[in-house]
């Protein structure tokens, strides 16, 4: 429901902050005081067209924001979630500049005006004497009947089935149209995947092959170098060991004192001899145990050549072949799976169609069952509202093509006078009649669901006396299930309200401003008296107003 409305520099309103409540709120004031200004400002927040006249004279811009409690409005929360907008609150804001340009926000995020309008349809419904667009649209008739029949969730699920069916049909059509291309692609993939299967390049194999090829190609040279090193260590005439033996022998013949002085050098020469002997043994072992294998080198080079050849063929680097193999295998599996199998996809289309039709037929049966009761309930309310001679019925006919909402076309039909055939509501109802018909329909629908906030702008025009009191009672009954804002000239209607807002126009500092205030009990009595008897309030008029207010409020407890 609408809980706050803030208006800045709009029309003749300088600043207005309203806290609104559930139940029925009456909005009254002198003719020309600006009762429609509040509704006009709200309309801007709901995506209505803005113009230069929206901005208060002498100001740069008008700024209006409306805050809604959407705790019980699942459709509104779903709308916000679908667009990834915050859902912890619902704040609509509209700014209109003096040049006529406007900007819009939802929960602080910039949006288009059409977004405001789309979300607004889930938040509040506006009814006026001259504009009942929602009630004149047949999709509204369908929605109201589904609400009455308790089929809202079923219709939402049906829409999902419909979209799935349509998506399957589109995939089948695309596959049929591209059959030759798909077949050619499948054959190419089979050949490519088979070739890569045969290559069977293992993980890390390429690096291993390259390392082995480098080692094998240089092995003969390495063996020669190892043999040369071994020879250098051997004890021939010029070998390191021979020379070390000669050095040790000569130093061993030195005087004892000299040997003590050269003890460290002698020790290091002894260690060097041991190290060289070990090195010589290792080098001889390597030379003796390592064999040249020309065939292995040929095999490794052939394997590397095959890998590089296939890589060039697919225009990739050799190290990318494994990833390419996986991608092509996945694509082939997809093309050979059910998604690209005409027979399997045809069966999926038939199953989706049958599921949709089964659910649609069940909803159609529920609609037919509820249509008579809904029509009779509205008919009863019309009698209370002074349209007892009118007949109202819900006509259901099959659609030419299935839709997200099902197989039915729902249309509200009415005959305003006895003997006349029923015709679509939009073609026969006058403004005053349409206001009361709308009220009757909303009263019936509201008994079966939590209706969004509703605004009734002078729907009581053309009625008076007992009918006016009944209009007020019906509006209060609607307010008991949600929120009703009603602009009225009738004290019989205003007296029924749970809350009462008064609007007046004042001249201040050579300018005219509109003010709005929530009336207390005494203020309501004075306002009702004004509506009953004019500007001059007599004691009798005040007493009548008090009696009317007390009677109206007492009757509702």
Image: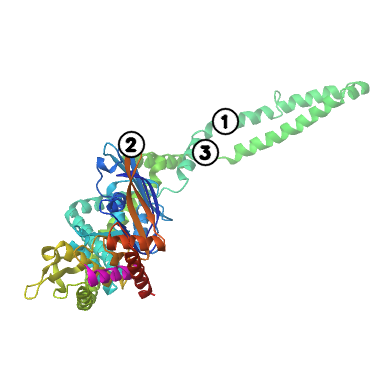
Disc with the residue nearer the chain's start (1 vs 3): 1
Q: Residue beneath label 1, please?
A: 224
Distance between the alpha carbons at the discs numbered 1 and 2: 95 Å
Q: Does the residue at mark 1 contact the one at mark 2 (Cβ under 8 Å)?
A: no
Disc with the residue nearer the chain's start (1 vs 2): 2
Q: Is residue 314 visible in this depiction of the protein?
A: no
Pinpoint residue 119: horizontal percent, then vertical percent.
31, 55
Q: Quadrant of the N terminus?
A: bottom left
Disc with the residue nearer the chain's start (2 vs 3): 2
Main SS, magenta residues: helix
Say which of 286 and 111 sits in front. Answer: 111
Say which of 244 and 442 sits in front. Answer: 442
Residue displayed at 17% across by 66% down: 433
Q: Residue beneath label 2, please?
A: 60
Q: Residue beneath label 3, please?
A: 292
Quarter of image, res 381: bottom left
Does the magenta run of residues contain 435? no
Local crowd at mark 3 within 10 Å, few (<14), some, or many (≥20)? few
């Amino acid at each position: 429901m609408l809980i706050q409305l803030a208006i800045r520099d709009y029309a003749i309103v300088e600043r207005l902050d309203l806290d609104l409540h559930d139940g029925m709120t009456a909005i009254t004031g002198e003719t020309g005081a600006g009762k429609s200004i509040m509704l006009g400002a709200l309309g801007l927040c709901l995506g209505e067209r803005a113009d230069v006249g929206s901005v208060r004279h002498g100001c740069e811009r008008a700024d209006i924001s409306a805050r809604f409690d959407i705790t019980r409005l699942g459709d509104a929360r779903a709308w916000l979630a679908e667009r990834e907008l915050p859902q912890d609150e619902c704040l609509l804001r509209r700014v209109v500049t003096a040049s006529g340009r406007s900007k819009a926000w939802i929960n602080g995020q910039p949006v288009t005006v059409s977004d405001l309008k789309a979300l607004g349809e889930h938040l509040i419904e506006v009814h006026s004497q001259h504009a009942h667009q929602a009630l004149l649209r047949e999709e509204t008739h369908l929605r109201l009947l589904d609400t009455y029949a308790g089929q809202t969730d079923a219709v939402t699920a049906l829409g999902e089935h419909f979209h799935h069916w349509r998506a399957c049909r589109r995939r089948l059509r695309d596959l049929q149209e591209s059959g030759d291309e798909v077949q050619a692609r499948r054959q190419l993939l089979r050949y490519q995947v088979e070739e890569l299967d045969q290559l069977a390049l293992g993980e890390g194999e390429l690096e291993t092959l390259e390392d082995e090829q480098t080692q094998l190609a240089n092995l003969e040279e390495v063996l020669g170098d190892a043999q040369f090193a071994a020879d250098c260590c051997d004890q021939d005439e010029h070998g390191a060991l021979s020379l070390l033996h000669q050095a040790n022998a000569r130093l061993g013949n030195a005087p004892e004192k000299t040997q003590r002085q050269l003890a460290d050098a002698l020790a290091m020469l002894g260690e060097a001899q041991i190290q060289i002997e070990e090195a010589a043994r290792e080098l001889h072992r390597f030379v003796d145990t390592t064999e040249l294998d020309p065939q292995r080198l040929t095999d490794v080079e052939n394997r590397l050549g095959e890998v590089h050849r296939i890589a060039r063929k697919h225009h990739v680097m050799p190290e990318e072949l494994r990833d390419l193999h996986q991608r092509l295998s996945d694509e082939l599996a997809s093309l050979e799976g059910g998604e690209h199998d005409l027979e399997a996809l045809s069966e999926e289309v038939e199953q989706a169609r049958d599921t949709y039709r089964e659910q649609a037929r069940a909803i159609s049966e529920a609609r037919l069952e509820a249509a008579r009761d809904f029509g009779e309930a509205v008919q009863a309310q019309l009698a209370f509202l002074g349209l007892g001679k009118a007949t109202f019925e819900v006509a259901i006919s099959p659609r030419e093509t299935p839709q997200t909402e099902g197989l039915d076309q729902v249309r509200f039909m009415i005959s305003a006078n006895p003997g006349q055939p029923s015709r679509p509501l939009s073609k026969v109802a006058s403004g005053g009649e349409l206001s009361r018909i709308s009220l009757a329909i909303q009263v019936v629908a509201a008994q079966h669901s939590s209706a969004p906030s509703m605004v009734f702008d002078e729907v009581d025009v053309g009625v008076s006396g007992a009918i006016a009191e009944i209009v007020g009672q019906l509006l209060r009954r609607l307010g008991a299930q949600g929120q009703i804002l009603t602009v009225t000239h009738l004290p019989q209607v205003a007296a029924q309200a749970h809350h009462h807002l008064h609007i007046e126009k004042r001249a201040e500092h050579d300018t005219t401003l509109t003010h709005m205030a929530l009336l207390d009990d005494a203020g309501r009595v004075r306002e009702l008296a004004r509506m009953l008897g004019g500007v001059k309030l007599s004691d009798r008029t005040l007493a009548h107003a008090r009696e009317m207010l007390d009677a109206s409020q007492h009757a509702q407890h």
